[in-house]
């Protein structure tokens, strides 16, 4: 169990923070140099995903790809896996992407469009240095998934949901409870809600 944790990018901007987090692991798997999380509870996770005006995403600057030569496959199970219940409460995701007024606007008309966008409630536009960013906030995220199966290096995640809730202002959506099965397989999503 941990009380809190945070991961920041090289500019000290927040990428993710966690409130109290508790995980249980399979001890036998640890003995065999594997981490199998059999349950996970996370309170107040906050994730920030930001695309810089250059097109680079904040996460790509903080987490460098592994450039070492690939190790030969042992054919065995993944070194890290999640198999079991996952519960998340009070989560938030912040997504920011570059924004600009219409290309057809010039001079004072362009300045008025920017001022109007900055003053509007929706969509949320803000300045960051010389750049303008459109912000989307997803809050009140809670997940109750009694069964989640995934592994590092695998492109498949399967979750049985008892409940998923989220609120967003842009787009204006409130989800109070979604239940069912979600499968992310490669780049495809299979929903049975």
Image (tube, rainbow, N blue to C red):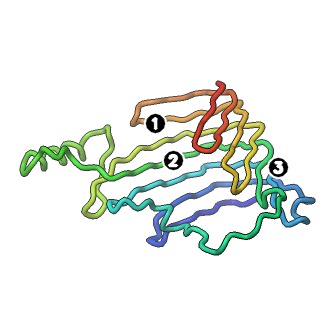
User: Which tag, 3 or 2, sits closer to the chain's start?
Assistant: 3
Front residue of this view, candidates 190 and 51: 190
Front residue of this view, candidates 46 and 66: 66
List the residue tagged with mark 2: 93
Question: Going by the image, does 86 lie left or right of 175?
Answer: right
- Disc 3 from disc 2: Cα separation: 25 Å
User: Which tag, 1 or 3, sits closer to the chain's start?
Assistant: 3
User: Which tag, 2 or 1, sits closer to the chain's start?
Assistant: 2
Secondary structure of residue under mark 3? strand
Residue 31's spot in the image, x, y percent?
A: 91, 66
Between disc 1 and disc 3, the foreground one is 3
Which numbered circle lies on residue 38?
3
Residue 117's spot in the image, x, y percent?
A: 23, 43
Q: Residue at x 24, y 47 (%)?
A: 118
Residue 145's spot in the image, x, y percent?
A: 72, 37
Question: Going by the image, does 139 lie left or right of 108?
Answer: right
The image shows a total of numbered marks equal to 3
């Amino acid at each position: 169990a941990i009380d809190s944790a945070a991961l920041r990018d090289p500019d000290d901007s927040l990428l993710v923070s966690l409130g109290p987090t508790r995980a249980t692991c399979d001890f036998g798997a640890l003995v065999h140099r594997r981490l199998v999380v059999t349950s996970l509870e996370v309170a107040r996770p906050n994730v920030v995903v930001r695309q810089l005006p250059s097109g680079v995403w904040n996460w790509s600057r903080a987490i460098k790809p592994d450039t070492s030569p690939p190790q030969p496959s042992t054919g065995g199970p993944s070194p890290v896996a999640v198999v079991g219940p996952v519960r998340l409460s009070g989560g938030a995701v912040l997504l920011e992407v570059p924004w600009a007024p219409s290309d057809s606007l010039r001079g004072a008309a362009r300045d008025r469009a920017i001022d109007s966008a900055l003053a509007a409630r929706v969509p949320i536009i803000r300045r960051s240095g010389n750049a303008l960013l459109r912000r989307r906030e997803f809050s009140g995220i809670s997940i109750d998934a009694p069964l989640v199966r995934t592994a590092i290096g695998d492109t498949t995640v399967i979750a049985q949901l008892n409940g998923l809730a989220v609120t967003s202002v842009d787009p204006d959506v409130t989800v109070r409870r979604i239940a069912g099965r979600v499968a992310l397989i490669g780049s495809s999503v299979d929903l049975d809600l």
